[in-house]
Amino acid sequence: MAVAASIALGETSAQRRMARPSRLGDKAFEWLTLAMALTVVLLIILTGWQLWHGSMLAIKKFGFHFLTASTWDPVAEQFGALPFIYGTLVSSFLALLIAVPLSIATAAYLTELAPLWIRQPLVSLIEMLAAIPSVILGLWGIFVMIPWLRDYPVPWLKRLLGWTPFFSGAMYGPSMLAGGIIIAIMILPIITSISREILRSVPDLQREAAYALGATRWEVTRIAVLSYAKKGLFGATILGLGRALGETMAVTMVIGNTPQIVLSLFKPGYTLASVIANEFTEATTDIYLHALFAIGLVLFGITILVNLLAQLILRTITTKSATRAVQ
Amino acid sequence: MRFETAHHHTWRKIKSALACIIAFVSGVLVISPLGLVFFYLLIHGAGSVNWDFFTKLPAPVGAAGGGMANAIVGSLELLALAGVIGIPVGVLGGVYLAEYGSARINSVVRFMADILNGIPSITWGVVVYGLIVLRFKGFSAYAGGLALALIMIPLILRTTEEVILLVPNGYREASLALGVSRWKTIVHIVLKTASKGIITGILLALARVGGETAPLLFTAFGNRFWNYSLSQPIAALPIQIFTYAISPYDDWHRQAWAGALVLVTGVFFVNIMVRIVTRGRGASIV
């Protein structure tokens, strides 16, 4: 554009001399910003490479067996990731079980059912909940939530569902159940805010059509809004799953950190992220360190896949607002 | 027949009201952890937040008192380091997306940034451990700052892009028409106009990483004393809270609660300030 203008004006050589440095500045600035934008792509590649490179010894020694072996014995140098994969999946699904209905109901409340004056304050409070650092939720989990769980809901759960393998045995404190609940609290805000954006993007015509047919407020929400937004809500759930799988500090503090595979939610478990957090600085042998890097690689792989899936789902129904919330 | 329809209608209304109540209760349940956490932080922590807490080093096991002065200063140093690396990269990357990028490059970068946002923060600890700590044979403040910066980059990049896109094109055209070069237009006109929104994004990113523990565990590592060199391990508030929380000592638990109260106050302060400053502007934070 600048070039076209200068030609049209029949520029003098003096003018060209003045213009040249700034064009150079333009190019340099564009390349600089491009380089900065591309660091994002570079970071993903670098992370994958570093994790792969760092876990070389473990990959060579155990191969795919690493994913299926259930022994984690640093002294005997036997490393299998299965107990951690199991713990991560179970605690995350438990979290989703708790968080998804609550989040979607809250999102529906915020967009469809609540009186207008309540909406903005509630949204702000949910954003504040998202701002609580994980380590603080963990501290609260250890000293407030676990004793409360042990005293009130657990005896009640035992009486009601004690005959199933999931609620058998005694709960001494840190447990899969506590881990799942803490993760649920951590992912409530993100699932709620994305679900809210998705429900907001449902066209008003949908609602008006249902109201015109004489539907009640709840029927409008259920028939015209929720079922219309089904796919987006699924995307929000998957994104929440991605966050749940990688939650580290709060879970590490309440899940009990015992590498075992037991069905009972009252027993301690261990997750991929917590074993890294706990044992990384204790890894004295090379193979131990490489095994922990391999755990990191597994976690990276799973979360990348889950996030890819979530982004693809959310992007196909894309409205700008829906992707904006994905922070 | 007529009676039946009326009955049916009442039932539908009751169902609607019930659904509203259930949704309301869900909303209350969702925000209840916020109230509960803050309540217990005040109960357990407020008593130990005193002058000593902000000015003294941690006391050895068994000795009462002591503070977290080194951890508070350490956290600020780490945030400064993270900012020095993360802010320019994030802001300039956002400038590229908003001002230069082609649709294809932009969608790739945006997609990657969103994926990066979803990667567990502990991953950055592991990666920086491999890249920096192993290579330079030691935990350091630099490594911790870098790990935090890597979390900040995609956050700042995305908010900067969004804010810059809100700057009206007329501003750019007016500046270019005066013969100002494009990059000077961007720096002096576009970035200046969008500066409030960009700073908001930066502050929120800092508040977010200020509470991060996982990426610091094996990069900054923590330190019971003052840090005199950035190439040495450094204390940070979140690490200190974690160490104290999982310790068996009551004194340390009290300190952990106090530290948590201070940390949460800082994080909430930034969040609330940002909300007050940007309130009433709706979607546009320019």
Image: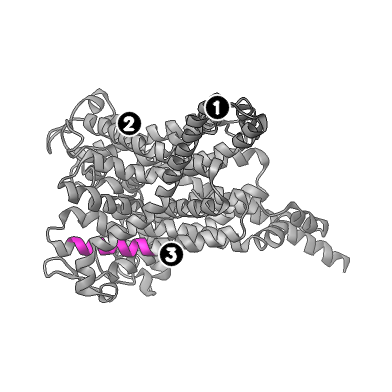
Say what amino acid the circle numbered 2 marks: Ala
Could you tell me residue A223's position as x and y percent? 71, 62
Which residue is pictured at 36% across the width and 55% down the height? A149
Chain letter of disc 1 in the image: A
Crowding near the residue tagged with mark 3, few <14, some 14–19, many ≥20 C-alpha atoms within 10 Å: some
Say what amino acid the circle numbered 3 marks: Leu
Q: Nearer the viewer, residue A39 or A230?
A: A39
Which residue is pictured at 36% across the width and 46% down the height? B150
In the image: residue A182, left or right of residue B64: right
Q: Nearer the viewer, residue A143 or A72?
A: A72
- Residue B11 visible in the picture: yes
Decide whether residue A298 is among the magenta residues: yes
Q: Nearer the viewer, mark 3 or mark 2?
A: 3
- Determine if marks 3 and 2 fall on one subunit: no
- Determine if marks 3 and 1 fall on one subunit: yes
Distance, label 3 to label 2, CA atoms, is 43 Å
Residue A7's place in the image compared with A133, above or below, is: above
Magenta stretch, residue numbers:
A289-301
Chain letter of disc 3 in the image: A
